[in-house]
Amino acid sequence: MKINNIMKQARQMQSQMMQIQENLANETVEASVGGGMVTATFTGQGDIKGITIDPEVINPDDKEMLEDLVVSAVNEGLKKSRELMTSKMGNIAGALNAMGMGL
């Protein structure tokens, strides 16, 4: 009988995880660098939604700086997206670990 309860809990958690993943697709995080010169926007699932570049930073003679700012904004946005996902999934992962079924 205990295995039935564990399986039922596992199915409930799986359903919760799917709901959280759907919700993460609708949440966004932003990362700005260079004092707001470049902003990257991501979904909570880590998909990039857009990049905004302040026109003042566009200088054909210094494209390396713009490239560095874009890379920094993307990396920071990915980090924030992962942190959001981890915080949302944390309760379920903790429950699975408590059941001896860690992710």
Image (cartoon, rainbow, N blue to C red):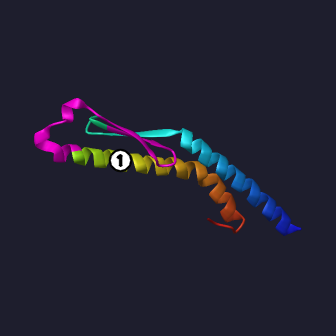
Residue 44 x, y percent position in the rendering: 51, 45
Q: Identify which residue is drawn at 60% across, 54% down.
A: 90
Picture quadrant where residue 50 is located: top left
* Residue nearest the observer in this picture, 100 or 72: 72
Furthest toward the right, the residue is 1
Horizontal side of 65 relative to 44 (left or right) equals left
Q: Picture quarter containing residue 65?
A: top left
**Residue at x-position 21% and y-position 43%:** 66
Q: The magenta stretch spans which residues?
A: 39-66
Give the residue drawn at x 28%, y 45%: 70
Q: Is residue 22 left or right of residue 51?
A: right
Residue 51 shown left or right of residue 27 in the figure: left
Q: Quadrant of the N terminus?
A: bottom right
Q: Secondary structure at mark 1?
A: helix
Relative image position of residue 60 (x, y in whole percent): 13, 39
Quadrant of the image containing the C terminus: bottom right
Q: Which residue is mark 1?
A: 74
Give the image location of residue 57, x and y in percent: 20, 35
Type of the residue with mark 1: Val
Q: Residue furthest left?
A: 61
Q: State whether residue 33 is above or below residue 55.
A: below
So how many labels did they put on this image? 1
Determine the residue positioned at 23% across, 48% down: 68
